[in-house]
Image (cartoon, helix red, strand yellow):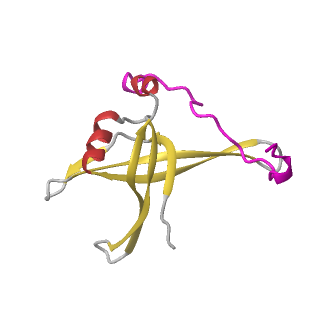
């Protein structure tokens, strides 16, 4: 069995870029930033940010370009795709992207604030930090 599945919740780092392919199909892409919070060995809370390239096609691309803006919160479900090519100088290049199969827009109130260029609240989504392993005998059912 094989599985290539990605789930991301994050904020757009730029407005979506939309193009129409020669076939007439719409393609939209943007970068999505996700944060990871952890406590280091000194007991200090730290944050790591990852940036992901997301690509959407068809109706989903049209919806994304219409409703998403820089700073918008989005949930993406998709699959990984890595492309390889050679640039003009003969150097090998590689890019890994998330091909979206499902898009869920963030809360409407947050989307409106972003569209009005207001700063959205920093912690809209609760942060669940990793905890110690759960003992199966502690579960009450």
Q: Is residue 140 magenta?
A: yes
Which residue is located at x 44 percent, y 47 percent?
A: 76
Q: Nearer the viewer, residue 5 or 30?
A: 5
Residue 43 found in image quarter? top right
Residue 59 found in image quarter? top left
128 sits to left or right of 62: right
118 sits to left or right of 24: right
Which residue is located at x 47 percent, y 43 percent?
A: 75
Q: Residue furthest bottom?
A: 90
Q: Nearer the viewer, residue 134 or 44?
A: 134
Q: What is the magenta range?
A: 113-141
Quadrant of the drawing holding the C terminus: top right
The image position of residue 140, as x and y in percent, is 82, 43
For the image shown, how many numbered marks are present on the structure?
A: 0
The image position of residue 34, as x and y in percent, is 54, 46
Q: Nearer the viewer, residue 28 or 6?
A: 6
**Image height check: is 79 above or below 110?**
below
Q: Nearer the viewer, residue 42 or 125?
A: 125
The image position of residue 138, as x and y in percent, is 85, 47
Main SS category, magenta section: loop
**Image height check: is 64 above or below 115?**
below
The image position of residue 88, as x and y in percent, is 28, 72
Q: Is residue 127 magenta?
A: yes
Which residue is located at x 58 percent, y 34 percent?
A: 125
């Amino acid at each position: 069995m094989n599985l290539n599945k990605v789930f991301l919740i994050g904020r757009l780092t730029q407005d979506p870029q939309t193009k129409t392919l020669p076939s007439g199909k719409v393609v939209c892409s943007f970068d999505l930033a996700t944060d990871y919070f952890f406590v280091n060995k000194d007991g200090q809370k730290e944050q790591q940010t990852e940036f992901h390239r997301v690509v959407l096609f068809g109706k989903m691309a049209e919806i994304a370009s219409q409703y998403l803006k820089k700073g918008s919160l989005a949930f993406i479900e998709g699959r990984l795709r890595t492309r390889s090519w050679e640039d003009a100088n003969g150097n090998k290049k590689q890019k890994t992207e998330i091909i979206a199969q499902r898009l869920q827009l963030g809360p409407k109130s947050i989307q409106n604030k972003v569209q009005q260029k207001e700063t959205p609240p920093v912690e809209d989504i609760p942060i669940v930090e990793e905890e110690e392993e759960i003992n199966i005998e502690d579960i009450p059912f």
